[in-house]
Every structure is written in structure tokens, then in C-alpha cells.
Amino acid sequence: MERSSTPLLDRDLFRPVAGFIDVVADVVGFLQGLFTSLRIARPRFTDVLAATKDVVRTGFRPVILVSFPFGMSFGLFFESLLGLLGMRSLGSAALVPAVIREEGPLVAGAVGAATFGAAICADIGSRKVRDELDAMMMMAVDPRARLYTPRILGAIIGCLILSVFSTMAGLSGGWFLIVLLRDTSSGQFLMGIEILMEPSDVYWLLVKGLAMGMIVGISACYCGSRAEGGPAGVAAAVRRSILASFPIIVFSSFVVNQLVWGSSAPI
């Protein structure tokens, strides 16, 4: 009888795992290079300020336009739910965990990945396919210090600012729904917010905003620096940057929520 030539374990099954390990190793090397460039050459303040302005200008309107309807939806849901329990006036209290802890930084990060994150990736990717990055290296100019680091810092600071505006827009949407459309007084709305809101909520909102900006900035710079193949390669790099940012943003938000609010241990 002839023995079967089919192996017990197909090597194709391990190719995605090996590819994932290669990508992780490449990202670690990319981050190590960024930290090395920070020690050697500090980014210029004017470059960081310009990158921050671009981030805020690019993401401000989309963040507001997305956050306001989200706040209205949360307000309608919680106001209707608590109305069934006879606590309709406390619908605004539920907006605190929904908007401040979740919606504000998540919208800023998700919308930022599709707006200023895509712009950063397209800018660096277009420089990559035109060999501008290699030309900078030939002139002894480190693109990590002149291009990557200012944009990452600008994304971090800008996303922090956008998280605050996103939270304010979400609360404004909830106020518009609960107060103007559902005939609840502004005093009851503010009283409901004071019931569940704590100073630590604002602190962790800022922390999550910084984390979202760092994720978007690093993903955009990494994918842009690996672009190849002309305009089509730049478009593929932008798509990879957005698709990579979304799950990391959601997962990091879940981890922070679990560490801060999902455990009884003091943080």
C-alpha cells in the first residue's frame, strides 16, 4: 500500500502566524528607531505645533458632526429606559459613563484615524514612493526626527483636544434631546450629571485621548513609511493604517475601562 504524502500539519496554516510575528517585530523595530531618534535629535517645536494645528483643523468638524448625534442617541435611549422606571429626570446621569468614559475618546480616535491619520499616512507614503525619505537619509537628515516624531506628537496633542470637544459635543447632543425635545429642565439635567460624574472621569478621558492619538499617529507613520508601488501603494497604505487603528483603539479602550472601572482594586 502507498503511504499518503499529505503532511499531518499543513505549513500554510502557520504562514499567517509567521506573518503576524514578522509585522510585530517590524513595528517594535520602528518604535525603537523613533525612541532612538528622540534621544539624538529633538523635534522642533514649530513642527509639532504645525502638526497639531493640522490635526485639529482636519478632525474638528467630523468629530463634532459624529459626536452630537451620538449624544442625542444616548440621551434618547437612557431617558426612555429610565422613564419606564419612573426616573426620567435622571436620564442625563447615564450620559456620564456613556459619553465621558466611552463616546468622547472613541469617536476622536476612530474619526481621527479616518481623517488626520489618513492624511499623515498619505503624506509620508507619497514621500516614500517619491524616494524623498531615502534622499533625506543621503543628506544625513533623519526623517524620523523631522517627519515622524512631530506628526506623532501632533496627533497625540490634537487627539487630546478633539476628545474634549467630542465629549462636549456628545453632552450637548444629550442636552438638546433631553431638555429641548423631551421637556426636562436644565437644572434636572445638570443634577443628573453630578450624580455619577467624578473628577477621575475627566482625568481618564484625557489619558484615553492621549492613547488614541498615539495609536493613530504611530499607525499612520508606520504604514506610510512602508508604502511602495506608486499612488496605488499609497492608497493601500492608508487603508492598512485605518484598518489597523480601529481594532487597537477599541481594544485599548476596553483595557482601560477594565483596569479603571471594571475592577474594585484602587488604581
Image: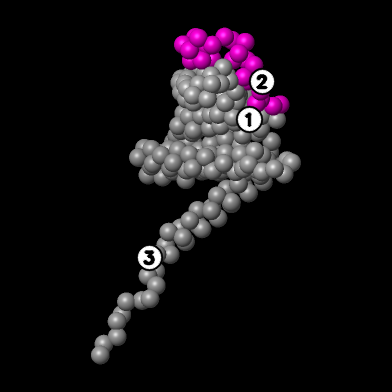
Q: Residues within 10 Å of mark 1 (few under 14, many from 20)?
A: many
Give the camera-side residue of 237 and 138: 237
Nearer mark to the viewer, of 1 and 3? 1
Task: Please give the range of residues in magenta.
Answer: 175-199
Q: Amino acid at mark 3?
A: Asp
Out of 36 and 157, give the one closest to the viewer: 157
Residue 205's disc number: 1
Q: Which mark identifies residue 8?
A: none
> Within the image, what quadrant is residue 56 found in?
top right
Residue 114 at x, y percent in the picture: 45, 32
Q: Is residue 196 magenta?
A: yes
Find disc 3 in the rendering and name its residue.
Answer: 12
Residue beneath disc 2 = 194
The residue lying at 59 percent from left, 51 percent from top is: 28
Q: Residue furthest right?
A: 266
**Disc 3 element:** helix
Magenta-colored segment: predominant secondary structure: helix
Quarter-of-image position of residue 97? top right
Query: In x, y percent, where is residue 73?
Result: 46, 23
Mark 2 surroundings within 10 Å by alpha-carbon count, few (fewer than 14), some (14 through 19), many (20 or more): few
**Residue 250 position (above or below residue 94):** below
Compare residues 108 and 81 and report the one nearer the observer: 81
Lower sequence index among marks 1 and 2? 2
Q: CA distance from mark 1 to mark 3?
A: 43 Å
